[in-house]
Amino acid sequence: MFDDQRSKKVILVLHCLLNQNARIDGCAYFPGAMGEAAQAVVESGIGVLQMPCPELCCLGLDRAGRFRDGADLGIREALLEGEGRAACEALVQHVMHNVREYRKHGFEIVGVVGNDGSPACGVELTHYVDRGEGPGPGAFVLLLREALVKEGLNLPFVALRDHAWAERAARVKALLAAATKR
């Protein structure tokens, strides 16, 4: 089955790698896709699973102004509490359904691309409402990593970074290069 030209390799990418229009106002640094990093992913010959944007899906395009008791709740926090968490977990399960389906048919999931500084998709750095940027994963990456570990998958996560495109695109390219050699 699937004896054709496909690579049988898939990389999971954050939504805004291919669609900057999903980003919060003031945070789109490209008109469409994320330039060199997006181009490298597409040209690698590795299939692309564009994950849903948890911020857009759970909080809307104009997602600022989440409040609790008169205080700004913040995007990361809104995605980890109550209805926001349930919606974010549902998106993770949607991604995991695809991951399971690919694996069932012998496809390799080569890794995950996030974006440091994002309250949802940060890998090593996220945005906290009370202290700004700090260490830790974004809400979606946190829940996704937990789900992948439950499936026995310890995938490499790499992150792009607003304002550090060249260095971070190089990380994505290195992950792709390693995957194409296998």
Image: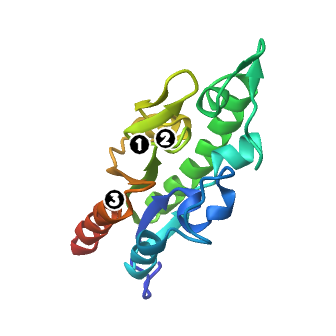
Secondary element under disc 2, as helix, strand or loop, is: helix
Please give the label number shown on residue 84: none
Q: Which residue is mark 1?
A: 123
Which mark's residue is nearer the viewer, 2 or 1? 1
Callout 3 crowding tier (Cα within 10 Å): few <14, some 14–19, many ≥20: some
Pick the residue in front: 73 or 4.
Answer: 73
Mark nearer the N terminus (2 vs 1): 1
In the rendered image of this protein, does residue 74 appear above or below residue 64? Answer: above
> Which numbered dot is residue 141?
2
Mark closer to the chain start, 3 or 1: 1
Q: Amino acid at mark 1?
A: Val
The reply to whether the C-beta atoms of the residues labelled 2 and 1 are less than 8 Å apart is yes
> In the rendered structure, which disc, 3 or 2, sits on the residue that comes first in sequence?
2
Where is residue 4, by image quadrant?
Answer: bottom left
In the figure, residue 50 lies in which quadrant? Answer: bottom right
Are the residues flagged by discs 3 and 1 in contact, CB closer than 8 Å? Answer: no
Q: CA distance from mark 2 to mark 1?
A: 6 Å
Residue linked to disc 3 = 168
- In contact (CB < 8 Å): disc 3 and disc 2: no
Closer to the camera in the image, 171 or 131 = 131
